[in-house]
Image: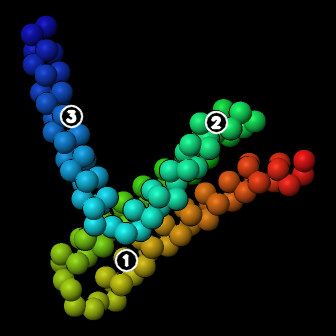
C-alpha cells in the first residue's frame, strides 16, 4: 500500500502548510486588529475563571468557552470580509458597505450570545444564592 502512504504524506504536507498559513494570519490579526486585541484582552480572565470555577458543570464550561470562540471566529471572518472588500475597491459602494455591515452584525450577534450565556450560567446562580 505504498500509494496510500504517498497520499497520506502529501496530505500531511498540505496540512502543515495550512497550519503555517493559519499561524501567520493569527500573528497579523493579533498585531493589526484592535477589536481582536480587545476581545482577547477581555476573554483572557474569563478563560482563567473557567479553569478554576468548580461550580460550573462541564457542559456549561463548554458552552461558555464555545461562546467566546464564536466571537473570535466571527471577528476573524469579519476582518477577512473587510480585507477582501477593501482589496477590490476603496471607493464607496452600497454592496461593499452591506458586506462590511453584515460582518459587523455577525460579530455583534456573537457578542450578545456570549454575554447571554455568561449571564445565565455564571451571574444568575450567584444572584440567587
Instruction: Where is residue 118? Give x, y as percent.
Output: 68, 54
Which residue lies under the disc numbered 2? 52
Depth check, mark 2 against mark 3: the one in front is 2
Compare marks 2 and 1 and give the one earlier in the sequence. 2
- Secondary element type, mark 1: helix
Q: Is residue 16 left or right of residue 115?
A: left
Nearest the viewer among 50 and 61 is 50
Q: Nearer the viewer, mark 2 or mark 1?
A: 2
The residue lying at 37 percent from left, 76 percent from top is 99
Q: Residue 102: x, y in percent?
A: 44, 74
Mark 1 surroundings: few (<14), some (14-19) or many (≥20) residues within 10 A: many
**Vertical comparison of 9 with 80: above or below:** above
Query: Which residue lies at the image location 18% right of the left edge and 34% below the top edge?
Result: 16
Lower sequence index among marks 2 and 3: 3
Q: How is the image coloured?
A: rainbow
Measured along the vertical axis of the image, is residue 44 above or below residue 60?
Answer: below
Who's the residue at 34% across and 89% down the image? 94
Measuring from the top left, give residue 2's x and y in whole percent.
9, 10
> Dot 3, crowdedness within 10 Å: few (<14), some or many (≥20)?
few
Mark 3 = which residue? 15
Secondary structure of residue under mark 2: helix
**Is 37 situated above or below 5?**
below
Query: Is 91 above or below relative to 103?
Result: below
Residue that mark 1 sits on: 100
Residue 61 visible in the displayed image: yes
Amino acid at each position: 500500500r505504498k500509494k496510500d502512504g504517498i497520499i497520506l504524506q502529501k496530505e500531511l504536507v498540505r496540512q502543515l502548510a495550512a497550519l503555517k498559513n493559519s499561524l501567520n494570519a493569527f500573528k497579523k490579526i493579533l498585531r493589526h486588529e484592535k477589536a481582536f486585541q480587545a476581545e482577547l484582552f477581555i476573554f483572557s480572565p474569563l478563560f482563567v475563571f473557567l479553569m478554576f470555577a468548580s461550580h460550573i458543570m462541564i457542559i456549561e464550561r463548554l458552552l461558555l468557552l464555545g461562546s467566546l470562540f464564536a466571537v473570535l471566529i466571527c471577528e476573524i471572518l469579519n476582518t477577512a470580509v473587510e480585507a477582501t472588500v477593501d482589496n477590490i475597491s476603496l471607493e464607496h459602494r452600497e454592496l461593499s458597505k452591506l458586506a462590511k455591515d453584515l460582518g459587523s452584525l455577525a460579530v455583534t450577534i456573537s457578542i450578545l450570545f456570549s454575554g447571554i450565556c455568561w449571564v445565565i450560567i455564571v451571574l444568575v446562580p450567584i444572584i440567587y444564592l
